[in-house]
Image (cartoon, rainbow, N blue to C red):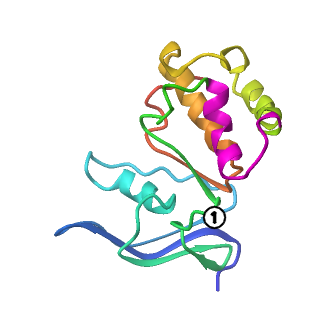
Amino acid sequence: MSGNKVLELKNISKSFGTRKIIDKLNLSLDQGDILSIIGPSGAGKTTLLRLIAGLESADSGKFIHNGKEFDPTDRNNHLVGMVFQDYNLFPNLSVMDNITLAPIMVNKMSKADAEKVAEPVLKQLDLEKFKNLYPYQLSGGQKQRVAIARALQMKPEILCYDEPTSALDP
């Protein structure tokens, strides 16, 4: 049984066809830890993040949160948020609509409530003046902050960033 480990991965493996991407990986993170995964292109960094976020299924191994095994692919699990390398913003939605879509669709919040919850995050990330703009009207750094705001709206305990410095914006 785990102590105060927020996240543990035990013997995680993942292959695509005959290509082994991750082989019996073990890691653990305490509350407040920051983990950077570095390596060459194709080494499995994004695959690992996708496994933790439940966007891919592991071939084997266990995921443990606060001492209890969990399935990251369970759609009712909002433990992990993800900020994608290419942001994955919906081009037909405004900044506010991109940020509030998941709370409305998944958490069944009203649009008004979702917007009320989004306002402090918009302020914190200096996005207030952009809330009615569309992704094509934003810089790379602004899009990245919108993606962060969107991930934070689901209040994840763990946040995975893929290429977090790609559009570095203070």
The residue shown at (46%, 36%) is 88
Q: Please state which amino acid type lies under the numbered disc 1.
A: Asn
Which quarter of the figure has residue 101? top right
The reply to whether the magenta stretch includes residue 99 is yes
* x, y percent for residue 106: 66, 52
Start-end of magenta stretch: 95-112
Q: Is residue 108 left or right of residue 9?
A: right
Of residues 93 and 88, the one nearer the viewer is 93
The reply to whether the magenta stretch includes residue 14 is no
- Quarter in which the C terminus is drawn: top right
Report the label total.
1
Q: Which residue is mark 1?
A: 76
Of residues 121 and 106, the one nearer the viewer is 106
Most extreme residue toward the left is: 18
* x, y percent for residue 81: 59, 51
The residue shown at (51%, 32%) is 89
Which quarter of the figure has residue 131? top right
SS for callout 1:
loop
The residue shown at (79%, 29%) is 119
Prevailing secondary structure class for the magenta stretch in the rendered image: helix
* x, y percent for residue 21: 27, 63
Does residue 6 sit above or below 47 in this rendering?
below
* Circle 1 Cα neighbour tier, 10 Å, few/some/many (<14 / 14–19 / ≥20): few
The residue shown at (69%, 78%) is 3
* x, y percent for residue 17: 19, 67
